[in-house]
């Protein structure tokens, strides 16, 4: 009886270990996300230092920007992020085709960001709002274009993930690569949700 009891202990421990949900993605993407967050934390410090030294410029600066452009970018990124949530959920349930469609949807919506940003910058420049128009716009361009670079990397990652998902590389038991791409994409969403009010709303 003691032998039976001792054998049942590791079984219960194993059950407890198996029931623990794994950390999504992989160690590499979490290191990358940490680096990105540190980078933008430092950039946000620059924003606050510049704002404290030039309060008038940061109060009047948003009035010349196109708030509709910032709002459109926000909607594109949030909608694209939702698609990635659905893509991960689909692959977890073994729906490879559905997951691929959601990823493609995320990519198409994600490309709305650089498209809107292109026309926004054209409008800005046509109205004399460039990097030399004042400290507010210098910080604005530096932060938003830096964010656009990270979004571009994210889009390239999503395209790669879409091909791999379509080819059946990911399964319900092995899809950490897809989760990693989704995590990075959500990180760009969160960062934009901070950038958007800083430049388009706060006075």
Image (cartoon, rainbow, N blue to C red):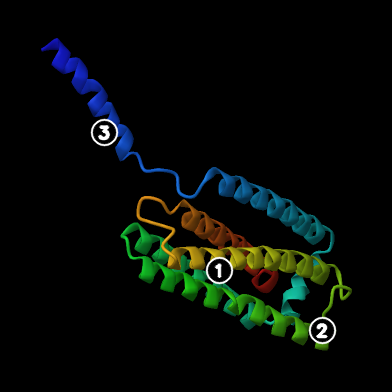
Q: Earlier in the sequence, mark 1 or mark 2?
A: 2
What mark, if any, has residue 15 been given in the picture?
3
SS at circle 1: helix
Mark 1 nearby-residue class (10 Å; few <14, some 14–19, many ≥20): some
What mark, if any, has residue 23 been given in the picture?
none
> In the visual, does 11 lie left or right of 37?
left
What mark, if any, has residue 125 been given in the picture?
2
Q: Earlier in the sequence, mark 3 or mark 2?
A: 3
> Between marks 3 and 2, how big is the CA–CA gap?
62 Å
> Can you identify the residue that label 1 sits on?
159
Residue lying at 20% horizontally and 19% vertically, measured from the top left: 7
Residue 94: image quadrant is: bottom left
User: Which residue occupies the extreme front position in the image?
Assistant: 167
- Please say if the residues under marks 3 and 2 sit with CB atoms less than 8 Å apart: no
Residue lying at 80% horizontally and 72% vertically, measured from the top left: 137
Q: Where the C terminus falls, by quadrant?
A: bottom right
Q: Where the N terminus falls, by quadrant?
A: top left
């Amino acid at each position: 009886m003691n032998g039976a009891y001792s054998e049942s202990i590791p079984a219960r421990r194993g059950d407890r270990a198996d029931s623990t949900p794994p950390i999504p993605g992989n160690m590499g993407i979490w290191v990358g996300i940490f680096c990105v967050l540190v980078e933008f934390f430092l950039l946000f410090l620059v924003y606050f230092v510049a704002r404290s030294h030039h309060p008038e410029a940061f109060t009047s600066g948003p009035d010349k920007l196109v708030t509709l452009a910032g709002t459109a970018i926000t909607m594109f990124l949030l909608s694209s992020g939702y698609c990635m949530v659905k893509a991960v959920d689909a692959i977890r349930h073994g729906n490879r085709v559905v997951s691929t469609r959601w990823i493609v949807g995320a990519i198409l919506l994600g490309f709305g960001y650089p498209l809107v940003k292109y026309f926004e910058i054209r409008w800005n420049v046509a109205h004399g709002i460039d990097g030399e128009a004042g400290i507010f716009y210098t910080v604005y361009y530096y932060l938003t274009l830096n964010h656009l670079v990270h979004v571009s990397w994210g889009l390239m990652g999503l395209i790669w993930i879409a091909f791999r998902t379509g080819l059946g590389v990911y399964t319900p038991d092995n899809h950490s690569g897809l989760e990693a791409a989704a995590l990075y994409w959500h990180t760009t969403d969160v960062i934009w949700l901070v950038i958007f009010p800083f430049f388009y709303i706060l006075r």
